[in-house]
Amino acid sequence: MGEDPPLPGVSGQVQGARPPHAAHEAIYRAYVEALTRDERIVVLRKGESRFCRLIDKALRVLTLGKQDRFLTSYTTTLGRRIYVPDDWDRYPAGERYLVLRHEAVHVRQFRRLTWPGMVLVYLFLPVPMGFAAGRAWLEWEGYRETLVATWQLEGRAAARSPALENHIAERFSGADYAWMWVAEGMVRRAIARTLRSLEKAPPPPLEWPAAGVAEGSVARVRPSSTSG
Ligand SMILES: [Zn+2]
């Protein structure tokens, strides 16, 4: 549930004078801290989870071997646990932040739908593949948040980039989520609609916490309220 591939890359540009990487790292750390404190979210390495290894096997069978990077490249959310790849710390901080913004949406979905509801909707309703509307709906909520978060972290141009649109659209129609919505044009239109609404009401850019201190300034890094 909520197994998500890496994003197409983050430029590392944040408004202001501080080095982008340091700013992104501070924003990431403050966000993790806020999620841990306010929503009791736990970020764990995938290799530590037997359940993740089981899902890996199931996905290989369901996708005829095409999905074989579940443990190494994907982030998976189960309940309030977010399982990240073992080499998570090597990902750029901006990308880690954007991935967690998306995964936090799945944590809230688990809360809303409960575990059995989430399994049912994500995997089986109304069909497991092709036009898996349940999974496509839950992932769309996540990717809409990805668009908002990208806009906030990297600005309007990054959120509107064709690379991001292609990345999202292809996730819906390809093997990553077992072909959850093969009508890719619908996904592209949904992205365009979201971007139009962000043009009308742009989300506030992120401010990073005070230099060297993530603690105590997390309130300044707020997730968007447009998710869910
Ligand atoms: Zn997702």
Image: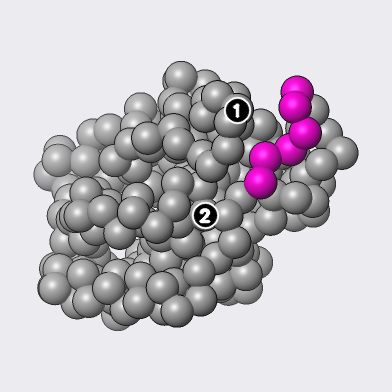
Q: Amino acid at mark 1?
A: Arg
Out of 151 and 46, give the one closest to the viewer. 151
Query: What's the magenta region?
Result: 207-212
Classified by dominant secondary structure, the portion drawn in magenta counts as: loop
Judge: label 2 CB < 8 Å from ligand 1: no
Q: Tag 1's secondary structure?
A: loop
Q: To which quarter of the image does residue 59 belong?
A: top left
Neighbor class of circle 1 (other Cα within 10 Å; few <14, some 14-19, many 20+) is few
Disc 2 marks which residue? 152
Q: Amino acid at mark 2?
A: Gln
Residue positioned 74% across, 38% down in the render: 209
- Determine which of the numbered discs, if any, sits on residue 18 in the image: 1
Left or right: where does residue 73 sit relative to residue 1? left
Residue 57 location (% of width, % of height): 30, 37
Classify 218 as above or below 25. Answer: below
Q: Number of numbered discs present?
A: 2
Residue furthest out toward the front: 17
Residue 98 within the segment the image draws in magenta: no
Out of 12 and 41, give the one closest to the viewer. 12
Residue 225 location (% of width, % of height): 62, 70
